[in-house]
């Protein structure tokens, strides 16, 4: 981690341009996050903090890990540290639904919204859709709502494999759980990952190109979940394979 910090400082010193400063900042942030994960893991092994979920993201590097609880703690520490107090931020009088596969992670679209626009929606829903291994899930088991405070809720929608995953319609059921999601005042934030083939290790180059092409032509999440096209915002990221 120290080597990464030195590298970031060296870039800023040798090339004093806005782009160099941005690169140095990015390297420093990555080092900070990586160090937080590593130190927390070591502390758990020594028996200090309670046990937390540790996810190994590489089969080659033992130290390449991800910890959901630490991820959320870093977000709170950042608060929104840069003066991003949820109670004092500008609030857009709308509802934002952030679709995530893992509800323990901080949605990238939320972080981008805070960083670039310095704005938070009045109601923020961290949404996860789960398909159960049964044909149908009854309406009384369709939705689970957990209030997180400061205008945040974690919502889980359960569907059977024969159910039509109509998310807007299912979200109407949150009304009985104390969460009102207005149909015409809601924006849906989705993440779209663009696979980029890279030379070197990993799969053969032709396989990487094939996978990237299949990924580009995959069906859209918005259509699959019956989201209104005029209320969807996609945040794209490039992933090297």
Image (tube, grey):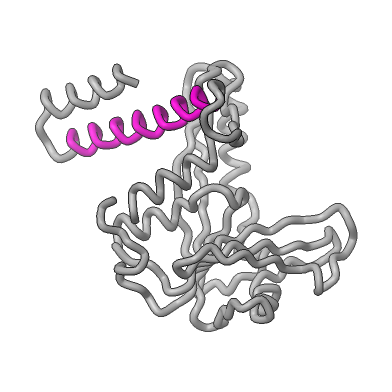
Q: Residue at x 26, y 24 (%)?
A: 5
Q: Is 38 in the magenta?
A: yes
Q: Is residue 205 visible?
A: no
**Nearer to us in this view, 189 or 181:** 181
Please tell me whether residue 56 belongs to the stretch shown in magenta: no
Outermost right residue: 135
The segment highlighted magenta reads 20-44
Relative height, residue 102 to residue 180 (above, below): above
Task: Please state the horizontal and vertical placement of residue 194, each as a whole percent of the image.
Answer: 50, 43
Q: Residue 95, image x and y in percent?
A: 49, 74
Relative to 16, is 79 above or below?
below
Which residue is rendered at x = 44% and y = 56% of the image?
109
> What x and y, as percent, mark residue 41?
52, 26
- The image shows a total of numbered marks equal to 0
Figure quadrant of residue 146: bottom right
Asked whether residue 179 appears in the rendered view, the answer is: yes
Judging depth in this view, the residue of 220 and 16 nearest the camera is: 16
x 57%, y 20%: residue: 202
Q: Quadrant of residue 227?
A: bottom right
């Amino acid at each position: 981690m120290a080597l990464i910090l030195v590298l970031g400082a060296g870039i800023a010193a040798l090339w004093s341009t806005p782009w160099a400063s941005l690169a140095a900042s990015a390297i420093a942030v990555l080092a900070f996050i990586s160090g937080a994960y590593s130190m927390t893991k070591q502390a758990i092994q020594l028996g200090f903090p309670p046990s937390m979920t540790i996810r190994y993201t590489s089969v080659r590097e033992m130290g390449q890990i991800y910890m959901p609880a630490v991820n959320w703690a870093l977000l709170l520490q950042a608060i929104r540290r840069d003066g991003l107090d949820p109670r004092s931020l500008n609030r857009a009088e709308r509802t934002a639904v952030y679709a995530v596969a893992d509800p323990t992670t901080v949605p990238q679209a939320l972080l981008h919204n805070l960083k670039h626009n310095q704005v938070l929606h009045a109601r923020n829903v961290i949404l996860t859709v789960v398909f159960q291994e049964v044909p149908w899930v009854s309406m009384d088991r369709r939705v689970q709502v957990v209030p997180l405070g400061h205008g945040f809720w974690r919502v889980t929608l359960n569907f059977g494999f024969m159910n039509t995953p109509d998310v807007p319609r299912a979200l109407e059921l949150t009304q009985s759980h104390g969460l009102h999601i207005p149909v015409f005042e809601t924006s849906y934030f989705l993440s779209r990952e663009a696979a980029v083939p890279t030379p070197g290790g990993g799969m053969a180059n032709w396989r990487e190109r094939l996978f990237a092409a299949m990924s580009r032509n995959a069906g859209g999440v918005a259509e699959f979940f019956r989201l209104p096209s005029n209320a969807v915002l996609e945040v794209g990221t490039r992933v090297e394979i």
